[in-house]
Image: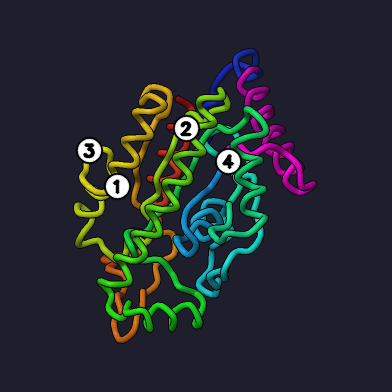
Amino acid sequence: MADWTDLLPTAVKAPITIYQNKSQIHEWWKRLLVYAGRGDTNVVVTGAAGSGKSVLTLCHHGEVKDREWKEPGTSTAVEKKAISVGEWTKIFTVVPGQEILAREAALDEAFNTHKNLEGVLHVVDFGFTSIRSSVSEQKLKDRGYVTLEAIRDYNLERELEEFKKVTNLIATACAAGRGPKWLTIAVSKADLYFDKLEQAKMYYYPEGDSPFVEELNRLLKRVGSNNLKCRVVPVCPKPKPYVWGDTKISPQLVTFDEPANYMQNFVGILAEVSDE
């Protein structure tokens, strides 16, 4: 079957071809910058350690395609990816959640050194944060975080602390005229709480009621909601069980299409906010 543009006269097709080539050249250029370790951050990916930043970004980049893929361990380095968002390609910088020098350098580059930061992708997980270190896990249990409810409360507190740091960076950058123009909050690991999606929505949406929402609305009031477009979207890029102690929460998938559907919705929203 012919492509729709194949039916157009040559004179009409020419501008379309030029536009498509321009988009492709832009993609190659961005990928070359990342390969060379250069290029300003267009989208900075933030969130607490273990929230799923790397997994979400790798899925968006198209690197997670088979069942043999293994989840990355604790990130100790900044990750940069050239990812197509709509018709154009953006440089995504994934900031480690750990308090390390690489994290501070990445945040400074994104928020303080140039005016090319377009958006912030902040990843949260409704308290289902991965504790990847067995030593850290045991220390938490020794401190009394032995139940699923207790560890989720602890994780939500850490998540809020991280978000407060990010909101301060956003407000300062906006005041200095450096952007960003949008904030997308990715509520990750939604497969673990499909039965509580409405509860999760009200925990993160600006119209909801939680300490997280209070901090979000403070940010929007500081910078002006017209100056910072905010979206909140559930995602479940790579479903897996969550285990804490003797409790195991399995993904609540009805069909295998759900992760892809959520990812497609997420990608569409990013393209939408990037074009606004």
At label 3, the amino acid type is Glu
Q: Earlier in the sequence, mark 4 or mark 1?
A: 4
Residue at the image position 66 percent from the left and 40 percent from the top: 109
Q: In the depicted view, which residue is nearer to us: 255 or 41? A: 41
As drawn, 131 above or below 75: below
Give me the C-alpha separation between circle 2 and circle 1: 19 Å
As drawn, 234 above or below 137: above
Residue at the image position 40 percent from the left and 77 percent from the top: 140
> To which residue does mark 1 refer?
204
Give me the C-alpha separation between circle 4 and circle 2: 27 Å
Give me the C-alpha separation between circle 3 and circle 2: 20 Å
> To which residue does mark 4 refer?
84
Quadrant of the snapshot with the C terminus: top left
* Residue at the right extreme, as displayed: 36
**What range is drawn magenta here?**
15-43
Image x and y of residue 126, in percent: 32, 59
> To which residue does mark 2 refer?
171
Q: Are discs 4 and 1 less than 8 Å apart at CB? A: no
Give me the C-alpha separation between circle 4 and circle 1: 26 Å
Q: Are discs 3 and 4 less than 8 Å apart at CB? A: no
* Count of numbered circles on the image: 4
Residue at the image position 52 percent from the left and 51 percent from the top: 60
